[in-house]
Amino acid sequence: MTAKKLFVFVLAVKIILVGIVFILFGEDRFIWADTAHYVGLGRNIFFGNGFSFTGEGGLFEPTTAFMPLYPALLGFFSLYVPYGYVILALLQAVATACTALFTYRIGTFFLSDKWAALAALLFVFEPLVSAIHVLMMPETFFVLFILMFAYYLLRAGREGTGYHVYLAALSFSLAVYTKPAGLFLVVPAVLYLLFSKEGLRRILVFSAVVVIMFAPWVMRNHAVSGRYVITTNTEKNACHWGVSSILAIKHRVDASDWNTTVHLPEYDNMVSRCNGAGDALRVFVSEYPNEFAKLIAISTVSMLTNDGYTVLFEKPTDEQVKAHHNYL
């Protein structure tokens, strides 16, 4: 299967899946538990209220915990495009076809064309991933940008083309503007470039592009929170959801229900000592080594399950099992 045929095949199937969901369930089925948060953020951008939540009494609360790219898309399509969620789902189908294409291209670095195409097909049609592609979730674009980043980084290292460093930096920036988890890829990217041809120069080029891309956002976050940060989301995830998961394993309760742990004095104590992912890791390893090991193992195995696709059929949305908070 050639790259062009792979792209067309994946796009056609994903468009059909979007059509089936729309015809059988209606436009509301594209919405999941967190969509309302993203939509609210995105609409406030276009209403002139900044990147903010609408709080009690109609007051606007600027946030530094979320990234603006996907909320802006949701806000635009929900406000100005008829059947906006359906159209955005179709746009995600295009993104998915591009994901398959870049997966294939990366695969050809290590595998034959046949096996690279098979790997791409298995990836984009895995049931949980397929559900994410249909739902209004930022992960579809995030994964695409990450794969673009990885591909161009590999090209830069293998072929010695500085042009690909620029594309890698741009793709990386788009990924982080979609979800801040992409920030964790900085270290392996820099190490990879360091051992490539003209490594130091390429690291400087990569860093310069990234700094330029994020300078306006960091300045905005400083104006909002008084801190020069790209995001405070890592504090929220590691110091809240992570702590909750550790305690859920310790006390053998449902890890997907925060109410089982957030009222524990132990939870408050851990959160009060946690100011970021580094603090969380230190506390987990030093004070809860067994629970942390179990958490890593369970979370890893859960990625092989298809629990997440049930969000297509569960109502109300606030009772859904989050696809990215998926535990056995």
Image (cartoon, rainbow, N blue to C red):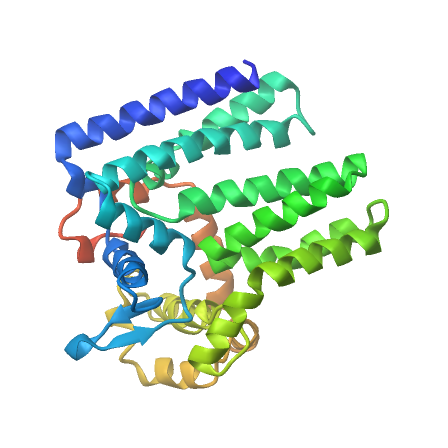
Answer above or below: position of 233 versus 128.
Answer: below
The percent position of residue 295, horizontal first and vertical second, equals 45, 60
Answer above or below: position of 136 versus 318.
Answer: above
The percent position of residue 131, horizontal first and vertical second, equals 32, 38
> In the image shown, does 297 or 82 lie closer to the viewer?
82
Name which residue lies at 36% across and 80% down.
267
Name which residue lies at 62% across and 61% down.
212
Residue 269 found in image quarter: bottom left
On the picture, is 115 further left or further right than 244? right
Answer above or below: position of 261 versus 196.
Answer: below
The percent position of residue 120, horizontal first and vertical second, equals 51, 27
Q: Is residue 327 visible?
A: no
> In the image shown, does 30 or 276 lie closer to the viewer?
30
Name which residue lies at 82% across and 46% down.
196
On the picture, is 47 further left or further right than 190? left
Q: Is residue 149 visible?
A: yes
Q: Quadrant of the N terminus?
A: top right
Q: How many marks?
A: 0
The percent position of residue 144, horizontal first and vertical second, equals 50, 40
On the picture, is 113 further left or further right than 180? right
On the picture, is 23 further left or further right than 304? left
> In the image shown, does 29 or 297 lie closer to the viewer?
29
Residue most extreme to the right: 198
Residue most extreme to the front: 48
> In the image shown, does 286 or 164 lie closer to the viewer?
164
